[in-house]
Amino acid sequence: MVDVDHESHLNMENANIYVLYGIGNAEAQVKDSTIIYSLGIDANTTQCVINETKPGLVTKWNFLENCSVVKGNGGFAPNVTLINVQVNGWGFTFKDSINTVLYNSMFTWLEFTDFAETSAYNIHAETVSLNHYSRVNATDSNVDKVELYGQSVIWAVNSTSTITQIYGQAMIYVNWYLDVHVVDSLGLDVPGADVTVKCADGTLTASGQTNMTGWVRLTVLSLILNATGPYTLWPHNITAIYGLYENSTMVDVERNIQTTIVLSELIIPEFSSVLALTATLMSATSAAAVLRKSKKASKSR
């Protein structure tokens, strides 16, 4: 393991490094080498965006530049540069770092401490650790093992972990996608319907409006995990309202699901207009037919 800490400098070429770990405002440049297990970055009081970071051959990469790192007051971040380096794993520690965003990436490990705040989208990590008051909002992501300590929080949307360990007052809020289709009495799409979802205790957890095809996707709080176990929030009461028409159904949103709500007495205005137009045309056609028949009768006399 090679530690590059504080204000130290490192230059390496043609080397096999098991772990390279950058701390403080250290500077390191590695060229034509292999990082066998993981590159580790320790950042304090920073903002950054990490995107498309996965194991593989890195042609050229600099942490400060490629991750758009902004240091806060008293913050630090190592200036690590890789040139033609095979990186078999990535690991990051964020302390008091807010507005950290992770996209479409794969990590060996992630650690969040103190008041770190992070948003993660479509990531995979082998291990994730949260401590103190750190918070992670995870969407469409999965983790092999997650550990939470102190009063840390994960707000998880369509995200899973194989092993979950929670200590102290830490909590995980588990959310899933609920796709609701609202139709009228004829089975036609109802756009612009208001849809609400309430947990079993009556708490409103999601609301939205159907699109032009009668669908709306909602993010629904399903259960809360803490050190004592899970607290389930289903069954969920789903209500659809369109003008004076309303209907509800009960669904256990314990995974991503779809459901349909029928407004049984409603015929959507667009279809009503078609019916009215059809009736008008039929009346006009009938009147014309009667008139033609009357004219023929007059001629025959």
Image: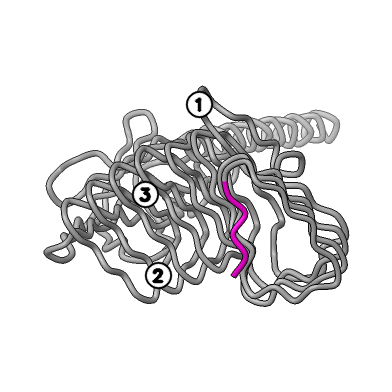
Q: Closer to the N terminus: mark 1 or mark 3?
A: 1
Q: Residues within 10 Å of mark 3 (few under 14, many from 20)?
A: some
**Mark-to-mark CA distance, 2 and 1:** 34 Å
| Circle 3: residue type | Trp
Question: On the image, numbered disc 3 is attached to which residue?
Answer: 155
In this view, 125 is above or below 134 = below
Q: Position of residue 134 (x, y in %)?
A: 35, 44
The amino acid at mark 2 is Ser
Secondary structure beneath disc 1?
strand
- Magenta: main secondary structure equals strand
What residue is at 30 percent from the left and 45 percent from the top?
Answer: 197
Please give the name of the residue rendered at 58% of the width and 64% of the height, measured from the top-left corner.
107
- Which residue is label 1 attached to? 74
Quadrant including the N terminus: bottom right
The residue under label 2 is 161
Q: Residue furthest front?
A: 8
Q: Which residues are magenta?
A: 1-5
In percent of width and height, residue 37 lies at 62, 75
- Dot in front, 1 or 3: 1
The residue closer to the viewer here, 249 or 43, is: 43
